[in-house]
Amino acid sequence: MKRNFITLVFMIFFSQFSWADLIPLSDVQLQSSVGRIDFSSAETSPEEAAGIPSNTLSPEDLTLTEGIALDINIQASLDVTYVDPDGVGESGSEGIIGLSGLHIGGSDDPITAEMLASDTPFKSNELAIINNVLIDVDPHEGMFITIEELGDNQGNGVDIIINDIFLGDRTRSAGGLLIENLSNFIQDKNVTRFNDLFGMNLATVDDGKDTANGNWVPFYSQVLTQSVDDALTNQSNQADTALTESLNQVSVGVGLPGFGANTTIDASFVLHMDKVAWVDDGGEFGLAGLMIYQGEDTNGDGIDDTIGPARLTQMKLETITHTNLEGESVQALYIENLDFKADIAIQSIYVGSPANSLGALHIKGLDTSGTSIWIYGH
């Protein structure tokens, strides 16, 4: 009691003689601001490290033989609407989430305000380019998809425009969305910019294609579904067998995707976007120069020197019976293991227009391993 009283006296005393003025930062100070977030990883024993998969996912990891290859030039426009028939609460009315004017294309020039508002933002020859899409399917290894080139090697990637996002009804637009030049071609000039901003020494791995000004980093994904019969055969005890049988029962007539007993998804990628922005009334709030990757230390000096792929590892999907917070039994889509590891570098966070930068941000060591998600109706 005495200690609390003395602490209170000190707080009252100093509050009488302390004050502070909040001084706004100048534009120069804001534009030169650089933020960094480091996620510290837990210590790993040598035995555990030996069992951790490498940060690559490639066809060499599998025993697949021959598949198909696709080159795709695409331009598309569509609308997407989600309807909630009963709204919120007992007397709620119908509401929607609508994506009106979703356009996919590939403009060689920067996206203009007129294009963001247009029903036909791309010219007939402005196609999104996706080359060397390789698909292999095997009953034991699952489906393996490779995308070698998303966009071209001049920095022109896939452009995505959403004219309006409607929340509630079709008269209430929350603005639009722009993703400009989504690509897996990592340009040297952008890597240099990231290195200068965040004091890094990263480089891309030579893609072996003799491409000037950068390198391609292929996108890899593997989807493997374990059938219920396989699960029952491989179960080691009766409890697991009973669980698998119950999963099979849930997947019938639930209205959720039939993911069987267990679907596992792995993915490995590096992506760069010139811009990701929310657009409203001609103004923007966005990220310019966004790269999703994972830094690798190839020479063992404790410093990342190589741009490696971000990795989604063995994310498992199941349709199950789940007990919600109210204690009710519901059918749910269960993401058992959302294990995503990545670094994120942002050259500029801006408001209004890219000229109004609030600074740069680097997020290192993002790790969501051990995360589980249940998705169900309410």
Image: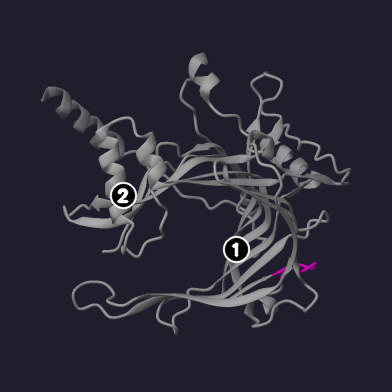
* Residue 106 located within the stretch drawn in magenta: yes
Q: Quadrant of residue 282?
A: bottom right
- Does 173 sit left or right of 72 as displayed? left
Question: Three-letter amino acid code at disc 1?
Answer: Ala
| Residue range highlighted in magenta | 105-111
Which residue is the site of mark 2? 247
* Residue 185 located within the stretch drawn in magenta: no
Q: Residue 30 in the image: x percent, y percent? A: 61, 50
Q: Does the CB distance between marks 1 and 2 fall below 8 Å?
A: no
- Does 351 sit left or right of 180 as displayed? left
Could you say whether the residue bearing mark 2 is in a helix, strand or loop? helix
Q: Nearer the viewer, residue 19 or 202?
A: 202
Toward the top, the furthest residue is 46
Question: Three-letter amino acid code at disc 2?
Answer: Leu
> Is residue 307 visible in this depiction of the protein?
yes
Q: Nearer the viewer, residue 242 or 378?
A: 242
Residue at 48%, 74% in the rendered image: 174
Question: Does residue 154 sit above or below 190 in this rendering?
Answer: below
Residue 277 is marked as 1
